Image (cartoon, grey):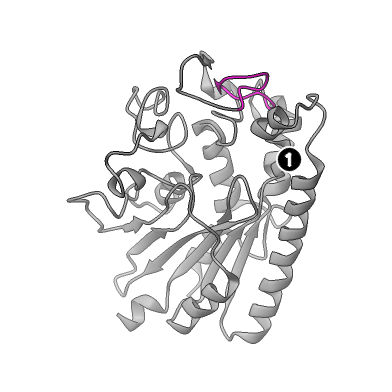
Amino acid sequence: MANLISNIFYAVISCLTLPNSATLYAARAKSNHKLLFVFGDSLFDPGNNIYLDPTEHIPSYFYPYGMSLKNHSTGRFSDGLVVPDYIALSAKLHIIPPFLKPNSNFVDGASFASAGAGALEIHANADIYAAGGRKFAFQNVAPIGCLPMMKQTYNLKPSQCAQKPLQLAREHNNALSNALEKLESNLKGFKYSIFDYFTEIGNMIDNPSKYGFKVGKVACCGSGAYRGSDCGTEPYELCKNPNEYVFFDGGHTTQHTNFRLSQLMWSGKANVTWPYNVHQLFQLP
């Protein structure tokens, strides 16, 4: 168990609506078999929440969520797979199941991600380090003020972003970088990575065609000028091809976007994911 714990790998992503954070980590056993454990909010949630309260109506368990998985709604807030699914596949693991799902096979890890999850404080990562964790990766906060739901909430023009949420995201990301530098200098063997989600998703929003999309500022599914709310709640609009859109609903990305983001997180260059990418962290002893 001690050898397993010492090879834990963590990656922290950001919450959608506020500069909260979520965590993804993997571990390697003596056999060199990698395990992936996921902590996060709705960006990473593979469907845990239905097991917390089976009576609650959660839109992600109903069409059109999951429409790219042969209309199989899994609880993921997307038309298909989310970023940790692709990270697992890149690491040659099975897609990681929800921890709360009965009779799941946790041979490759488990996902504790849950829609609505709160922030994971930096000191919590220090606590994980004390338990043996050494490899951490973080995804910083999105340009929140530029999401379809925020443009719609603030009644903005397509070229505009809500400035207060945008500034909060910038301040959070600067604080995250500073905190990780301090942890690296204070904790022996601490290795980390930051994926610049703020810049990369912002680029996709502003220049969708450069990344293989047609639409960056309007969601595939929802109501309102930017389809920024109420995806799955009648009446709502639904695009024909989610692969053409950066966002599936007002704040969650499409499967195609998640694949592109996972590639950047897994093997991005130093100007995108630094000082290591996730693949490099997996390869560290």
Q: How many marks?
A: 1
Image location of residue 243, percent across then percent down? 54, 24
* Quarter of the image with the N terminus in it: bottom left
Q: Is residue 6 left or right of residue 207?
A: left
Q: Secondary structure at mark 1?
A: helix
Q: Residue at x 35, y 52 (%)?
A: 93
Give the main secondary structure of the magenta stretch.
Answer: loop
Residue linked to disc 1: 145
Residue 217 on the magenta span? yes
The residue closer to the viewer here, 246 or 122, is 122
Q: Residue at x 60, y 69 (%)?
A: 192
The residue closer to the viewer here, 151 or 104, is 151
Residue 261 image-quadrant placement: top right
Image location of residue 66, percent across then percent down? 39, 28
Residue 7 image-quadrant placement: bottom left
Q: Is residue 90 left or right of residue 157?
A: left
Please say if 15 is above or below 232: below
How would you rate the neighbour count of disc 1 (Cα within 10 Å): few for under 14, some for 14-19, many for 20 or more? many
Image location of residue 176, percent across then percent down? 69, 65
Q: Residue at x 46, y 36 (%)?
A: 77
- Magenta span: 216-228
Three-letter code for the amino acid on which mark 1 is drawn: Gly
Q: Is residue 112 left or right of residue 104?
A: right
Residue 130 on the magenta span? no
Image location of residue 44, percent across then percent down? 47, 47
User: Hey, which residue is sitting farthest front in the picture?
Assistant: 55
